[in-house]
Image: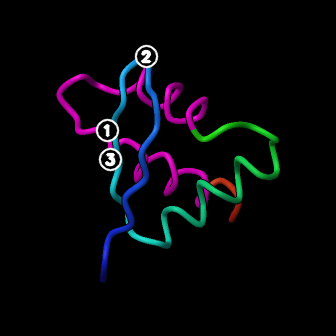
Amino acid sequence: MALIKRSLSLHGHRTSIALEPEFWDVVDGYISSEKRSLAGLIAEIDDNRDPDDPLSSAVRVWALKRVQSAAT
């Protein structure tokens, strides 16, 4: 499965995140329903992750938890 890369500014620096389309679907659904920006959500995830964990992994875990909480 191909990764989709998106670029954004995070805390004043340009960065990019590559995720599978299924994870982007969860992210996109959330930012659309909550009327938030992608950069704002990613900044929040970045601020709350362990600095040793890659940002893309932290976004995947966030998306998984979001789906799990919606299922309960």
- Which residues lie in the magenta part? 39-68
Query: Image check: 1 left or right of 22?
Result: left
Q: Mark 1 falls on what kind of element?
A: helix
Question: Cα distance, mark 2 to mark 3?
Answer: 18 Å
Q: Position of residue 17 (x, y in %)?
A: 35, 48
Q: Which residue bears the numbered disc 1? A: 55
Residue that appears at 36% across and 30% down? 14
Q: Nearer the viewer, residue 58 or 5?
A: 5
Depth check, mark 2 against mark 1: the one in front is: 2
Pick whichever, 33 or 18, lies toward us.
18
Q: Nearer the viewer, mark 2 or mark 3?
A: 2
Which residue occupies 39% across, 69% down?
A: 20
Q: At label 2, which amino acid type do we have?
A: Gly
Instruction: State which quarter of the image contains the C terminus.
Output: bottom right
Q: Residue furthest left?
A: 52
Find residue 56 and name its label: 3
Residue 1, magenta (yes or no): no
16 sits to left or right of 6: left
Helix, strand or loop status at disc 2: loop
| Neighbourhood count class around disc 3 (C-alpha, 10 Å): few under 14, some 14–19, many 20 upward | some
Q: Which is nearer the N-term, disc 2 or disc 3?
A: 2
**The label number, if any, that marks residue 12 in the structure image:** 2
Instruction: Indicate the secondary structure of the residue bearing disc 3.
Output: helix
Contact (Cβ within 8 Å) of mark 3 with mark 1: yes
Residue at 47% over, 72% down: 21
Q: CA distance from mark 3 to mark 1?
A: 4 Å
Q: Amino acid at mark 1?
A: Leu
Q: Could you say which disc has been placed on residue 39 in the image?
A: none
Q: Is residue 1 above or below residue 59?
A: below
